[in-house]
Amino acid sequence: MHNSLHNTTTISYIGCAAQVFLLVFFLGTEYFLLTIMCYDRYVAICKPLHYGTLLGSRACAHMAAAAWATGFLYSLLHTASIFSLPLCQGNALGQFFCELPHILKLSCSHSGYLRELGLLGVSGCLALGCFVFIVFSYLQIFRAVLRIPSEQGRHKAFSTCLPHLAVLSLFVSTAAFAHLKPPSISSPSLDLALSVLYSVVPPALNPLIYSLRNQELKDALRIMMTGCFSGAVKCQFSGV
């Protein structure tokens, strides 16, 4: 944001490392939290009588702490690995922020390159495991929802899952395509668009999608909008 506002295209080495660490940390934690939220919906719909036992306050705190700790360790390993590599292909990144694949292209260390690829492979296996868990959970959820006799009950269950599923689908599909697409279709503009879609859009949509399902927040927003509209009308009449 600072570079964009000041129309600059440079960043310090320490700043780039901090940017990589924070980006990987928050994106990794976001993915783990989305996986935990999937488990929350699975228990709420498929095992509602056991919800209080399986997802009490202590269990939720432990899972959230595990997600943040795993994201921190994951980010620390990648940042330490990528910035220990000697960069001999220049210092120009074809991206609007410091991103791992683009930094890796500047490296000339074969062993370091293989080490980072190994870390990426482990990360891919972990991400694939979470994805399989999510798919399995949603298959069970949809089977349970379709067995609900009332249409109102099915609608309520689907409305609980669809916002999470929409954010998750956008996050996973764009991130996977950005890093797994063949080099033949790669271009700076496409890389830029995909990066924005998986790094900016899902976190920005989270408060909107999840908070607006809260009735108290809806009522507060309605009162605020009504107050603003009434204030605007009063100001207009007083001006006349």
Image (spheres, rainbow, N blue to C red):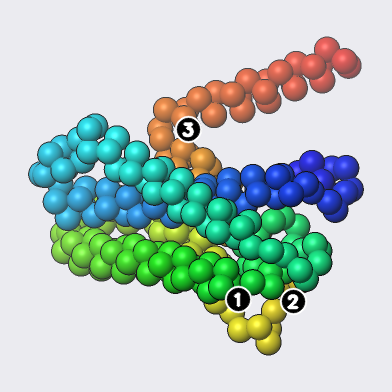
Give residue 51's quadrant in the image. top left
- Which of the two residues, 49 or 83, is positioned nearer the viewer here? 83
Image vertical order of residue 130 relative to residue 185, above or below = above
Q: Is there CB contact under 8 Å for labels 1 and 3?
A: no
- Which of the two residues, 150 or 29, is positioned nearer the viewer here? 29
Question: Of discs 2 and 1, which sits in the foreground?
Answer: 1
Q: CA distance from mark 2 to mark 1?
A: 25 Å
Give the farthest residue toward the bottom.
184
Observer able to see residue 52: yes
Give residue 180's quadrant in the image. bottom right
Observer able to see residue 102: no
Dot 1 or dot 3, earlier in sequence:
1
Neighbour tally class for label 3: few under 14, some 14-19, many 20 plus, Cα within 10 Å: few
Give residue 161's quadrant in the image. bottom left
Image vertical order of residue 71 relative to residue 213, above or below = below
Q: Residue at x 16, y 59 (%)?
A: 149
Mark 1 lies on residue: 110
Dot 2 or dot 1, earlier in sequence:
1
Q: CA distance from mark 2 to mark 3?
A: 42 Å
**Residue 199 image point, x, y percent:** 60, 55
Q: Is there CB contact under 8 Å for labels 2 and 3?
A: no
Question: Of discs 2 and 3, which sits in the foreground?
Answer: 2
Amino acid type for the residue under numbered disc 2:
Ser
Label 1, secondary structure: give it.
Answer: helix
Q: Please give the label number shown on residue 187.
A: 2
Left or right of residue 22: residue 33: left
Dot 2 or dot 3, earlier in sequence:
2
Neighbour tally class for label 2: few under 14, some 14-19, many 20 plus, Cα within 10 Å: few
**Residue 170 image point, x, y percent:** 52, 62
Amino acid type for the residue under numbered disc 1:
His
Mark 3 lies on residue: 218
